[in-house]
Image (spheres, rainbow, N blue to C red):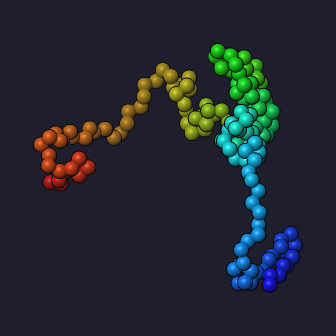
């Protein structure tokens, strides 16, 4: 005979060995293929965008979520010959929003400048690349037709 114990927000159910031996009478609910909260990838079976897809990396929420959805929807449903070519204003609006929140949406060039000067840094454009202190050596080429060892066997040490 099972017993139930309430502990704050939790409910603990104790069951006996006999309870486990009886077959379950739980009824499984058939999955709804059009459930927008089910993880089904970016595009749902009905062709709509799954804004809950983890592949969007949270872009559909946050301060620029609405402008992201507007731009992405425009691109997704675009019928133009050059897909999304009519969505430039929406993408511009999304970009302007993201620039207002650089701590949430860092730019690629911002990431590079945090780690050091980038290739697009004007102060480094006219300077020659710095020489490396370790020369690069080419590995010797062995003629495989004269070797009896398999290809993945290292050459014998001397």
Choose top left, top right, bottom left or bottom right for residue 132. top left
Is 157 left or right of 48, judged from the image as shown?
Answer: left
| Residue at image coords 74%, 28% | 73
| Picture quadrant of residue 40 | top right
Judge by depth and name the residue closer to the eye, 57 or 22. 22
Residue at x 77%, y 32% (from the top left corner): 69
Quadrant (top left, top right, bottom left, bottom right) of the C terminus: bottom left
Count of numbered circles on the image: 0
Q: Position of residue 151 (x, y in %)?
A: 23, 47
Position of 106 compared to 135: left or right?
A: right
Q: Is residue 64 visible?
A: no
Q: Residue 81 occupies which quadrant of the picture?
A: top right
| In-image side of 66 versus 140 (left or right) | right
Q: Residue at x 20, y 39 (%)?
A: 141
Horizontally, residue 3 falls left or right of residue 95, namely right
Outermost residue toward the top in this view: 81
Q: In what quadrant of the picture does the N terminus appear?
A: bottom right
Which x, y percent locates residue 20?
A: 71, 79
On the image, the x and y values in percent for residue 42 come to: 68, 38
Front residue of this view, candidates 53 and 67 = 53
> Is 156 placed above or below 64 here?
below
Residue 108 is at least partly visible in this image: yes
Image: 88 above or below 40: above
Q: Is 21 situated above or below 65?
A: below
- Residue drawn 61% across and 36% down? 111
**Which is nearer the eye, 32 or 62?**
32
Q: Where residue 51 appears, x then y in whole percent?
A: 75, 39
């Amino acid at each position: 005979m099972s017993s139930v114990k309430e502990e704050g927000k939790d409910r603990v159910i104790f069951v006996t060995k006999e309870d486990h031996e009886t077959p379950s009478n739980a009824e499984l609910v058939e999955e709804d293929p059009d459930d927008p909260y089910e993880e089904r990838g970016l595009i749902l079976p009905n062709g709509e965008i799954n804004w809950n897809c983890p592949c969007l990396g949270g872009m559909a929420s946050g301060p620029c979520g609405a402008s992201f959805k507007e731009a992405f929807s425009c691109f997704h449903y675009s019928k133009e010959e050059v897909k999304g070519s009519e969505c430039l204003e929406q993408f511009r609006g999304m970009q302007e929003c993201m620039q207002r929140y650089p701590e949430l949406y860092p730019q690629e060039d911002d990431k590079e400048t945090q780690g050091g000067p980038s290739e697009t840094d004007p102060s480094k454009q006219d300077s020659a690349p710095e020489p490396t202190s370790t020369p690069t050596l080419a590995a010797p080429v062995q003629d495989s037709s004269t070797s009896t060892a398999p290809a993945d066997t290292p050459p014998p040490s001397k």
